Image (cartoon, grey):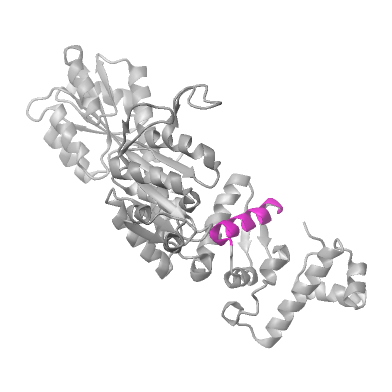
C-alpha cells in the first residue's frame, strides 16, 4: 500500500481482544500507516509469519495467550518486528516487565494520542536503522571480508577462516604481519564477533608510549607513587576487564616489563604502581607484531615463556604484494570511504593506473595504498578520474622494477609508450608544467611535445 507521494507505508499490527480499542487505534493511525488487526496472540503470530510487519501494538492482558507470552514468541521470530505494549493502569508492572523482555516501550491505557504517535515514530526509526545496519553489513560481506577488512584472495580467505574459529574462544592471540597489513582491524574483528563482544576493546601501542611510562599505562598507579602522579590512575588492564586488551608492537617491550606482563597472564592479577593490594582481572590478550618473535627469543630479546603464552592462537597476515588480486577491491573500497570523508567524489582510476597499482611492491602495504589514494583524491576536483599523470614517480617507476615477476606484461610498443608518457610527465613536473622548458630538457621541438601530450591524453596542466 502506498501514500499519495509514492512512499511505502509502514505496516502496524494491532493486537487487542477489545474491538473498540482496536477501532480507536485504527482511526488514529490509518492515515499514516497500513493497519492489520488481530484479537488474539495466536492470530497475531499467524499474521506476522505471513506478512512483513514493522510494528506490533500489543495488549498486555488478553484471554488465552497473554501479551507477555505473545511478546516472547514474537521475539524468537526471524526479523521480528518492534513491539509496543498497551497496559491498563493496574497492569503497569507487566508493561515495565515487557520492556525488560524486549518490547520497545509500553503505553498506559487510556493513552494520549500524541504520546503514542511519538513512541511509534521512535520504534519505527529504530527498526529502520537496524535494517540499514544489516544492509551495510551484508554489503561489506559481499566485498569478501568482514568488519572493515576487504579481500577475496585465497590468502585472505584463509585468514578469515582462522579468525572465525578464533572468535569462538577466549584464548590469547598473536597476530603477525608487516606494518600496514591491518593487524588492529583483525583484532577488532575478533572482538566484535567473539565471546567478549559485550566487553571493552582497549588498544595500546607499546611503541608509542615511553618505556618508563608503560608500567603505569598497563597497571595504573596510586596518587603520589612517583613524581607527577597527582592522582590515582586506572591502567589498561583494569579498563579491559572482561574484554580484550590489544597490545600492538609487543616486540618493543623491555624484558623487565615482559616479566610483569607474563605474571599477569599467569596469575590474572597485578598491583598498581605504588599500590599495596592485588587487583584481579579477566582479560583476553591479542598481541600484534611486525617482528619475528621466534628469532627474538633465540637472541634473548624476547622471553620464550611469554611468547608461548601469547602465541596460543597465531594469525599471520600476508603483505599486500602477495595478495595483489585484492587491489581493485581495496581501491574501490578506499575511494568510496575517502570520497565520503572528504566530500569529494572520483570517477575511479584508469585501467592503466590499476595495472601499475597491481604491479607496485607496496612496502607500506594497505596503509600505503590508502594514504596514496587519499592524497590523490585530496588534490583532485569532483568527478576526477585518477590517471597515470597523478601517480608519484615511485609508483610509476619503482626501484624494484627490474623484478620480472612484478613488471606489467606489456608488448614492446606498449612498454615504450608507457615509458615515454611517464618520462614526459616527470619532465613536466620538474619544470612546473612549462612546456617550452620541458621541450628543451627533452631535446625535442615544442610542437613535438604538444603532439605527444595530445596523443597520450596528458592534461595541459597538473591540478
Answer left or right for 318 relative to 353: left
Q: Quadrant of residue 423 in the image?
A: bottom right
Tell me residue 128's x, y (percent). Answer: 38, 38
- Count the labels in the image: 0
The quarter of the rendered structure image containing the C terminus is: bottom right
Q: Position of residue 57 (x, y in %)?
A: 25, 28
Q: Where is residue 37 in the image (x, y as percent from the top left)?
A: 21, 32
Q: Is residue 204 above or below residue 396?
A: above
**Residue at 73%, 66% in the rendered image:** 389
Viewer can see residue 148: no
**Image quadrant containing the N terminus:** top left
> Is the residue 283 above or below the residue 373 in the image?
above
Residue toward you, 52 or 420: 420
Q: In the picture provided, is 224 more to the left or to the right than 369?
A: left
In the image, residue 245 lies at what x, y percent? 39, 43
In which quarter of the view is residue 442 placed? bottom right
Q: Is residue 379 magenta?
A: yes
Q: Quadrant of residue 201?
A: top left
Along the line of sight, which residue is nearer the eye, 61 or 126? Answer: 126
**Residue 137 or 176: which is nearer the viewer?**
176
Q: Nearer the viewer, residue 422 or 407?
A: 407
Q: Name the residue: 38% across, 23% down.
A: 118
Say above or below: 265 vs 65: below
Q: Provide the residue span drawn in magenta.
A: 364-380
Q: Which residue lies furthest to the left in this view?
A: 64
Q: Which residue is drawn at 71% across and 77% down?
A: 418
44 displayed left or right of 84: left
Report the predominant secondary structure element of the magenta stretch. Answer: helix
Residue 29 shows in the view: yes
Toward the bottom, the furthest residue is 412
Amino acid at each position: 500500500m502506498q501514500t499519495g507521494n509514492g512512499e511505502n507505508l509502514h505496516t502496524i499490527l494491532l493486537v487487542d481482544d477489545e474491538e473498540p480499542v482496536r477501532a480507536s487505534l485504527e482511526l488514529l493511525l490509518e492515515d499514516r500507516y497500513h493497519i492489520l488487526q488481530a484479537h488474539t496472540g495466536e492470530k497475531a503470530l499467524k499474521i506476522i509469519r505471513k506478512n512483513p510487519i514493522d510494528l506490533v501494538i500489543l495488549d498486555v492482558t488478553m484471554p488465552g495467550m497473554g501479551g507477555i507470552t505473545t511478546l516472547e514468541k514474537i521475539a524468537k521470530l526471524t526479523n521480528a518486528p518492534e513491539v509496543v505494549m498497551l497496559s491498563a493502569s493496574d497492569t503497569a508492572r507487566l508493561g515495565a516487565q515487557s520492556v525488560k523482555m524486549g518490547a520497545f516501550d509500553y503505553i498506559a491505557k487510556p493513552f494520549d494520542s500524541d504520546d503514542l504517535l511519538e513512541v511509534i515514530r521512535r520504534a519505527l526509526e529504530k527498526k529502520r536503522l537496524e535494517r540499514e545496519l544489516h544492509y551495510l553489513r551484508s554489503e561489506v560481506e559481499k566485498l569478501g571480508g568482514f568488519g572493515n577488512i576487504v579481500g577475496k584472495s585465497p590468502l585472505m580467505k584463509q585468514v578469515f577462516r582462522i579468525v572465525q574459529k578464533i572468535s569462538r574462544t577466549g584464548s590469547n592471540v598473536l597476530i603477525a604481519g608487516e606494518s600496514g597489513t591491518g593487524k588492529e582491524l583483525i583484532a577488532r574483528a575478533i572482538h566484535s564477533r567473539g565471546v567478549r563482544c559485550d566487553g571493552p576493546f582497549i588498544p595500546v601501542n607499546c611503541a608509542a608510549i615511553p618505556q618508563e611510562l608503560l608500567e603505569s599505562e598497563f597497571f595504573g598507579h596510586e596518587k603520589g607513587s612517583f613524581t607527577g602522579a597527582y592522582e590515582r590512575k586506572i591502567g589498561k588492564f583494569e579498563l579491559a576487564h572482561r574484554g580484550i586488551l590489544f597490545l600492538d608492537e609487543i616486540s618493543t617491550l623491555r624484558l623487565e616489563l615482559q616479566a610483569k606482563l607474563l605474571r599477569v597472564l599467569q596469575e590474572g592479577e597485578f598491583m598498581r604502581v605504588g599500590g599495596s593490594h592485588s587487583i584481579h582481572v579477566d582479560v583476553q590478550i591479542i598481541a600484534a607484531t611486525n617482528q619475528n618473535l621466534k628469532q627474538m627469543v633465540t637472541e634473548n630479546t624476547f622471553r620464550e615463556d611469554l611468547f608461548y603464552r601469547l602465541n596460543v592462537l597465531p594469525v599471520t597476515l600476508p603483505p599486500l604484494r602477495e595478495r595483489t588480486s585484492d587491489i581493485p577491491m581495496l581501491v574501490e573500497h578506499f575511494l568510496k570511504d575517502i570520497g565520503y570523508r572528504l566530500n569529494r567524489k572520483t570517477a575511479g582510476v584508469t585501467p592503466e593506473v590499476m595495472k601499475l597499482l597491481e604491479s607496485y611492491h607496496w612496502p607500506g602495504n594497505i596503509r600505503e595504498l590508502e594514504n596514496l589514494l587519499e592524497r590523490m583524491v585530496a588534490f583532485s576536483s569532483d568527478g576526477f578520474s585518477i590517471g597515470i599523470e597523478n601517480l608519484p614517480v615511485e609508483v610509476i617507476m619503482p626501484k624494484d622494477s627490474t623484478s620480472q615477476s612484478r613488471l606489467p606484461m606489456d608488448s614492446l610498443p606498449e612498454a615504450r609508450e608507457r615509458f615515454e608518457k611517464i618520462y614526459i610527465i616527470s619532465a613536466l613536473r620538474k619544470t612546473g608544467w612549462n612546456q617550452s622548458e620541458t621541450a628543451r630538457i627533452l631535446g625535442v621541438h615544442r610542437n613535438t611535445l604538444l603532439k605527444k601530450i595530445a596523443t597520450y591524453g596528458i592534461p595541459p596542466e597538473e591540478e
